[in-house]
DNA sequence: AAGTGGTCTAGACCACACG
DNA sequence: GTGTGGTCTAGACCACTTC
């Protein structure tokens, strides 16, 4: 038993030892782990402590726990990965550019009129529509077109967005409970090409994102990246290691 | 105190009650939560149980815990979201198409020769290069170009990939500990256009993904989606609700 | 010094699923 | 029935950080 290296808690050390065994194949995929009672004996820890360690492995998806059937090794931990919901200001600065943005449009419209039709939002609710051009060293990097539901974010009407872009402002001021997104690519048309300073037809990664407070839509945004000028990156390390 | 509705565990009910208070603004952002001792009194639960509930809120990023200073409400839980690392077979079937794929190329090459140069992999290591065209109802949906490091996945050389595509095979057979990815968009050239049955220049969402076993690269893949034929979607619900 | 969270133990009861 | 994990309590010691 290699449960060494103090400074980490006992449950952490047990978790690490067990995840190492799983990754090294000591316990085979589909096979059973020793029961909690056996691990209690092996590690000389209390059942709570062992249970906590194994529960963390289960949260990471390395194992599945079943009453009576015991704990079995899975490998469904690859089913998700994390994409940072980056603050574009940080991302731009990280590549050494000075971040800036410009508000191209800001209007309050009534849902159901003016061509606005946001289903799931009551007809007549005021909506804030805003368009932002983000740039680095004055080079356009991303065009953001956003609708904000004033029923979910009433204070937004008093916000000019002259010092803070909408995305960080919303994150800091309007809580949300769920989000969905869609990643696609578009060939930019002449309007986009002009705003983003690209050749017509350039492939642009595009993210559409919607956030909700329970069932109520909060905001929906379409973010068109200026071709390959800014990369969308992410990484994920299994947290149990 | 609305700690009602049994069937859920006590710590779950406490967690839900507390997250609701945070989202409703009972505890303001930057403000302090009651200490564990106070919550023990309020909810009539043991300290372990209260601690577990609050620890889960902290894992989700709703609060930050500090010794002596207490637990404060943050709002950094929006910093990441989850993108499903979808099994394309499922995704295709979900939209009602019959999934199929074809191996366009399969070769074993030596790193450092034949134009192969995978830094971080020893020169001379055999690499499996494979190209797969995924389709739905015989319509091309995604072109996958992949390298696999045989030092990390020795059994891959015996696998023809005639019945299982590389991605699910790898997930099921070769463990990994970290992954990174890059999302971009490309204008497809003539070769891609032919393989994916698209017009030259069509914007195609592209994912590059690399996985590792600790420091050892396992596989790297470039997946080019056929324009907008297949969508990349994901959603995330705050797990504390 | 004192209050906070972090962790651990020992013991207990329960729910579930399999034989 | 029986073994598994799921959860809870009570009490304890410790580490950290602010006062």
Image (cartoon, coloured by chain):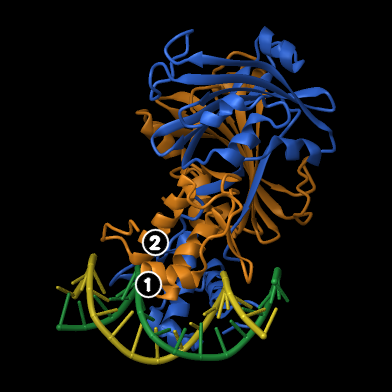
Chain colours: A blue, B orange, C yellow, D green
Q: State the residue position of label 2.
A: B14
The N terminus of chain B appears in which quarter of the rendering?
bottom left
Badge 1 density bin: few <14, some 14–19, many ≥20, Cα 10 Å: some
User: Could you tell me which chain the residue with mark 2 belongs to?
Assistant: B
Q: Looking at the picture, does residue D4 appear above or below residue A156?
A: below
> Residue B235 location, x and y as percent?
47, 39
Sequence-first tag of 2 and 1: 2
Of residues B5 and A144, the one nearer the viewer is B5
In the displayed structure image, the side of residue A138 where residue A118 appears, left or right:
left
> Residue A133 location, x and y as percent?
71, 22
SS assignment at label 1:
loop
The residue located at (36%, 60%) in the rendering is B13
Q: Is residue A60 visible?
A: yes
The residue located at (65%, 48%) in the rendering is A235
> Residue B187 location, x and y as percent?
67, 20
Q: State the residue position of label 1.
A: B45
In the displayed structure image, the side of residue A75 where residue B148 appears, left or right:
right
**Marks 2, 1 in one chain:** yes
> Residue B128 location, x and y as percent?
64, 47
Q: Looking at the picture, does residue A15 appear above or below residue A142?
A: below
Label drawn at residue B28: none
User: Could you tell me which chain the residue with mark 1 belongs to?
Assistant: B
Of residues B151 and D15, the one nearer the viewer is D15
Q: Is residue A6 visible?
A: no
Kindly indicate whether the residue at mark 1 contacts the one at mark 2 (C-beta within 8 angstroms).
yes
Which quadrant would residue B131 be assigned to in this image? top right
Q: Looking at the picture, does residue A154 appear above or below residue B219?
A: above
The residue located at (44%, 56%) in the rendering is B18
SS assignment at label 2:
helix
């Amino acid at each position: 038993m290699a449960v060494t290296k103090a400074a980490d808690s006992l449950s952490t050390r047990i978790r690490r030892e067990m995840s190492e065994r799983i990754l090294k194949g000591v316990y085979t995929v589909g096979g059973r782990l020793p029961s909690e009672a056996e691990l209690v004996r092996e590690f000389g820890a209390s059942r709570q402590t062992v249970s906590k360690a194994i529960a963390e492995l289960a949260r990471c998806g390395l194992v599945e726990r079943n009453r009576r059937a015991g704990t079995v090794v899975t490998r469904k931990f690859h089913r998700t990965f994390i994409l940072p919901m980056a603050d574009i200001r940080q991302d731009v600065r990280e590549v050494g550019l000075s971040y800036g943005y410009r508000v191209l449009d800001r209007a309050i419209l009534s849902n159901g009129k003016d061509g606005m039709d946001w289903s799931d939002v009551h007809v007549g609710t005021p909506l804030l529509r805003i368009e932002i051009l983000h740039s680095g060293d004055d080079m356009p990097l991303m065009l953001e077109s956003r609708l904000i539901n004033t029923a979910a974010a009433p204070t937004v009407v008093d916000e000019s967005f002259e010092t803070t872009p909408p995305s960080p402002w919303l994150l800091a001021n309007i809580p949300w409970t769920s989000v969905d997104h869609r990643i696609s690519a578009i060939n930019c048309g002449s309007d986009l090409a002009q705003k983003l300073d690209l050749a017509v037809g350039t492939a642009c990664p595009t993210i559409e994102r919607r956030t909700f407070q329970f069932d109520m839509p909060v905001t929906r945004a379409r973010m068109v990246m200026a071709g390959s000028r800014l990369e969308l990156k992410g990484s994920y390390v299994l947290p149990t290691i």
